[in-house]
């Protein structure tokens, strides 16, 4: 009686080896490339969405100024009556007589090359005007972001892990702080710490270096105050939600060390949503810096934007608005990517079999 292997050999087929019982088959070669391709596709979708959003934002930024009342010719002529030939020359110089779509395409082409045009009021390249004012705005936003992350997360973690009278008092103060408008907080800080106590300067951005950091303390606090309270409340809620989760209660019932539970299960799981919202809040500081710069006379983008809007300096207004919108959209996209890449619970667009 012939064996099965011999029968297969006589038919021209090789015997097939069977895996031992209880062992899983090895994945086929290239199986891991699917996840890599899904990651590339996910990032590509986000980048395409970023570019589409920036394109729509450029249309809104460019077109909205022409819907506002007023005419840049009024500021070019300083309200004086001029001969028709002189007015036509001004229109040709600043391309004000071209169709709106042609002006947009010319402006967009220049923006893609870093050229925002020429200021109507200062008769200088807008890029050079912005470069001289970028340091104040950047330092203000960075210092405010550091304050938001350090104090907001610290207060929220403390209130979440140490419930009691002190934590309730701290969160009540944070809730009250969220209701204070930024310009009101700025005025109060000036009156208390600059005028009454004389600890900080009242106005100005100072000279580059430590003096600029010293001048930026009160503006950064005023800008970050409401965001600190918001991040603190969010961190407290996330930590308390994790403390009540089933897996944390199971770890406590098993007698694991409290520090290990907090570090491994509570802080780790609560960090992702908190950091995501904190990142979006920091991106929102860019818009809030306009008010703070105007109050403290910092000479950054925000103050320059307000003055340019009043003077109908269209190229400057368009450039600053586009810089603000671009920074906000790019930060949001980066936060979305980091959250999706770091949190395994977020799908990258893969389909489960």
Image (spheres, rainbow, N blue to C red):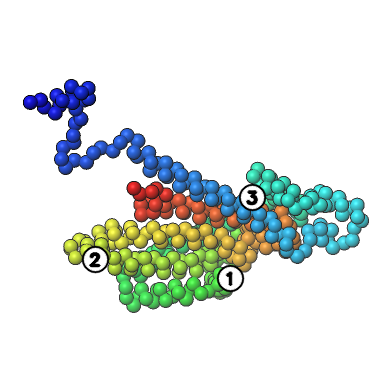
Residue at x 39% of width, y 52% of height: 347
Q: Which mark is residue 183?
A: 1
The percent position of residue 127, horizontal first and vertical second, equals 67, 48
Residue 9 at least partly seen: yes
Mark 2 — residue? 249
Q: Which of the 4 image quadrants contains residue 67?
A: bottom right
Mark 3 — residue? 131
Residue at x 35% of width, y 52% of height: 344
Please report contact status of discs 2 and 3: CB closer than 8 Å, yes or no: no
Decide which of 351, 57 is in the foreground and name it: 351
Residue at x 48% of width, y 51% of height: 334
Residue 320 at least partly seen: no
Q: CA distance from mark 3 to mark 1?
A: 26 Å
The percent position of residue 202, horizontal first and vertical second, equals 60, 67
Decide which of 91, 119 is in the foreground and name it: 91
Helix, strand or loop at mark 3 = helix
Seen in the picture, residue 161 relative to 128 is either above or below; the reply is below
Q: Residues within 10 Å of mark 2 (few under 14, many from 20)?
A: few
């Amino acid at each position: 009686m012939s064996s099965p292997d011999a029968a297969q050999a006589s038919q021209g087929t090789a015997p097939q080896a069977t895996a031992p019982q209880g062992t899983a088959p090895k994945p086929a070669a290239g199986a891991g490339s699917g996840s890599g391709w899904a990651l590339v596709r996910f990032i590509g979708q986000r980048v395409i969405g970023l570019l589409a959003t920036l394109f729509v934002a450029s249309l809104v930024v460019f077109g909205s100024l022409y819907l506002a009342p007023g005419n840049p010719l009024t500021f070019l002529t300083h309200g004086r009556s001029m001969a028709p030939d002189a007015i036509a020359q001004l229109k040709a110089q600043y391309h004000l007589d071209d169709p709106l779509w042609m002006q947009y395409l010319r402006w967009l082409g220049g923006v893609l090359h870093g050229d925002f045009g020429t200021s109507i009021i200062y008769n200088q390249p807008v890029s050079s005007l912005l470069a001289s004012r970028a340091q104040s705005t950047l330092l203000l936003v960075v210092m405010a972001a550091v304050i938001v992350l350090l104090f907001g997360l610290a207060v929220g973690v403390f209130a979440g892990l140490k419930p009691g009278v002190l934590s309730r008092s701290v969160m009540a103060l944070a809730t009250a702080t969220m209701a204070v408008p930024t310009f009101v907080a700025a005025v109060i800080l000036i009156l208390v710490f600059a005028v009454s106590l004389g600890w900080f300067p009242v106005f100005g951005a100072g000279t580059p270096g430590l003096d600029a950091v010293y001048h930026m303390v009160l503006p950064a606090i005023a800008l970050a105050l409401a965001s600190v309270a918001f991040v603190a409340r969010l961190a407290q809620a996330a930590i308390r939600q994790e403390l009540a989760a089933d897996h944390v209660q199971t770890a406590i019932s098993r007698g694991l060390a409290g520090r290990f539970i907090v570090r491994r299960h509570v802080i780790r799981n609560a960090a992702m949503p908190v950091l995501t919202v904190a990142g979006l809040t920091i991106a929102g500081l860019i818009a809030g810096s306009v008010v703070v710069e105007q109050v403290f006379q910092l000479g950054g983008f925000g103050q320059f934007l307000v003055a340019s809007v009043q003077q109908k300096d269209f190229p400057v207004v368009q450039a600053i608005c586009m810089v603000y919108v671009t920074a906000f959209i790019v930060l949001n996209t980066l936060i979305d990517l980091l959250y999706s890449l770091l949190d395994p619970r977020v799908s990258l667009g893969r389909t489960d079999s």
